[in-house]
Every structure is written in C-alpha cells, then in structure tokens.
Image (spheres, helix red, strand yellow):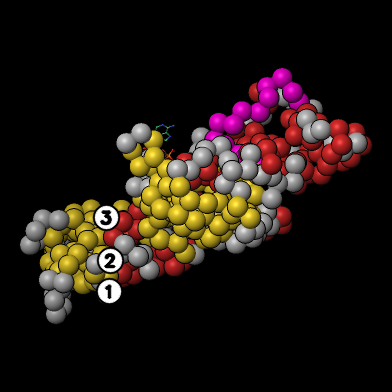
Amino acid sequence: MSITIQNISKGFGQFSALRDINLQVPSGELVALLGPSGCGKTTLLRIIAGLETPDGGQVLFDGQDTTHTDVRERQVGFVFQHYALFRHMTVFENVAFGLRVRPKATRPSEAEIKKRVHDLLSLVQLDWLADRYPPQLSGGQRQRIALARALAVEPKVLLLDEPFGALDAKVRKDLRRWLRRLHDELHVTSVFVTHDQEEALEVADTIVVMNHGQVEQVGSPQAVYDNPATPFVYEFLGNVNAFETPQGKGFVRPYEIAVSREPQENSIAGALTYVHSVGSLVRLEIKRADNAQYVDVELGREQFNQLNFQQGETVYLKPSQLRVF
Ligand SMILES: Nc1ncnc2c1ncn2[C@@H]1O[C@H](COP(=O)(O)OP(=O)(O)OP(=O)(O)O)[C@@H](O)[C@H]1O
C-alpha cells in the first residue's frame, strides 16, 4: 500500500511541530525518517498511524483519504522502542493477541491462529521461545517478538519508532540487517523513525531527512550522502569539513581531501595534531595554520603507511571537491 502525505502541518500550542510536509512512500518500500531530536519524526509517524490528527493536510493510503479514518481501521502495525509486550502472556500469546481480539466474524480459527503464530515466530527466528515470558528474553529478542506481534494482523503498513533505540550497538547492528532481510521477504510498506544516520543509510530504500518540522531532502541513501541538498543534510549525514570561500560556505568530506608534505597550488598549511589509526581507515586531525580551525581527513591505511606522516609535522591540504552553498 502506498502512502501519500499532502501538506501536513501540526502545531502544539504556539509551537509548530510539522510545517507543510509532502511525501510519497511507494508501495513496498522501506523508508527512514531521519533527523535530530525534536524535528517532528514521531509526530509525523503518529499522524500516519492515526494516533494524532494533523491541523491541516491529508494522509492517503493507496490514494484514499484516510486522514479521518480511525486508527483501528487503518491496518497499520506498530513497533515502538518501549512498546512493552504483555509480561504475563507467553511469547506465543503475545503474538496471537491481535488475532484473538478480532470480532468473531473475522477471527481465525484456533488452528489457524496456531499456524500463523508459529509461522511468524519462525520468520523472526524465535520459534523456540514460544512458551517463554517476556522478562525471560533479551532486549533484541523482545523487539523481534514485538515485530512478529505487529505483523500478525497482516498490516498494510508497518510503522517503527526507534525500534532498536534502547539496544546496545552490536545487537542494533544485527537487528537492522535482520530487519532489512525481513523486509526484502515481506515487502510491507514500512516507515521507521531513527536519529541514527548509520542505521538509516544501511537499512532504508529511501531516506527522508527532517529538520525543524520540515523535510530537507528525500532520496536514496547514496543520493542524500553524496549529494546533500542543504548544509544541514551535509552536516547531519556523516563527517564534513566546512571551508569559507569567496562564493560562500564550502563543504567537503574527510576522504575528499588530499594531504601532502610539499605545498601544492592553493593548498592550505596545517599541523598534524592527531592520528587516529584503528581499522582500515586512518583519521588525521589537522589544525590550519591560517585560522586555527581543525580539519578532519581520512586516508586508507596503505596510503597512510606509505606517506608515513608523523604527529606534529606540517602538512598541506587540498580539497579535491568543494560543494558551495
Ligand atoms: N503532545 C505534545 N505536546 C506538546 N509538544 C509536543 C507534543 N508532542 C511533541 N511535541 C513537540 O513537538 C516536537 C516534535 O516532537 P517529535 O516527538 O515528533 O520529535 P522527534 O523528531 O520524534 O524527536 P525524538 O527523536 O527526540 O523522539 C518536539 O519539540 C516536541 O517537544
């Protein structure tokens, strides 16, 4: 099911949380709403869910205006960061819950419920935990069960709000890969909220970068990373250095800067103040001689080893490309 957001705005008292948001989520896509804390991601997700009413604008599901459709009729599944499972129900009963509370006319038979729940538990690879209770699960397992529970009612749209936010880095990484694979299998139109750029870049088909209640840019991970539309997107997605130029502020990623021992035409002199050398990349911190600002540079380890720079020595920088805004 596709989702169309048209001119959505929402205020809380005097505060404008969303301003004229327009967005198209094609059927079957996995879209990330990415932005800093307070930019309006959750509010937009809640409006798509029907948990919040916008002040203006429409939400269309497959072209149908659902702005005023009740949340129960929207056929959306949710997974929230702290969306607690029912503690006193087994994993099996948690996943079965949404099916059991259906009106009799649409409720599946007991045998069908059993099959559906076991299929879903296999899908999230936790069938062996069916008889456990939530407090006996790890955080990552709980979130996978929460996802199975959301999927049980066969939602047309899946909405995830920082689903892995409370987990440690390693588990987050595993789960985001796993979510990507699951989505490739199921193709449920999904929107997930994150403030973690790496998570968005790794998982999403499309990233919606938000700031102060507005959409800054929409595009594939590669497009928003390689061609940021605004300085905000440049700074929010990955490391970046800013240089003053006569034409305006120029931005350059740390790996787009050449470093040498000899001055080049238009190069900038600086002192190598710090070398961070872990993994395949070596990060250099260079303090410019002219304005004392720090510049981050990344080199491949092999290149670094060949050049053999020493902390404290004078080096010369030259951005290979600058995007000026
Ligand atoms: N019910 C409410 N009443 C008043 N202000 C609210 C309400 N809900 C959200 N806001 C405000 O609206 C803004 C957007 O909130 P929202 O939760 O959508 O941000 P977010 O981008 O999801 O942030 P985070 O990443 O911190 O969850 C915030 O400044 C928040 O304080």
Between 322 and 14, the residue placed more toward the observer is 14
Q: Counting other residues with Cα less than 10 Å from the Cα at mark 3, is it few (<14), some (14-19), or many (20 or more)?
A: some
Please say if 60 is above or below 195: below
Residue at the disc numbered 3: 275
| Residue at the (25%, 60%) spot, across then down | 241
- For ligand 1, tell me if the residue under mark 2 lies within 8 Å: no
Residue type, mark 3 in image = Val
Tag 2, which secondary structure?
A: strand
**Range covered by the magenta-colored residues:** 77-90
Residue at the disc numbered 1: 321
Q: Quadrant of residue 113?
A: top right
Tag 3, which secondary structure?
A: strand
Q: Using the numbered discs, state the Cα–Cα distance from disc 3 to disc 1 in whole angstroms.
A: 23 Å
Q: Is residue 88 magenta?
A: yes
Which circle marks residue 252 in the picture? 2
Asked if disc 3 and disc 1 are in contact, CB closer than 8 Å, the reply is: no
Q: Main secondary structure of the magenta part?
A: loop
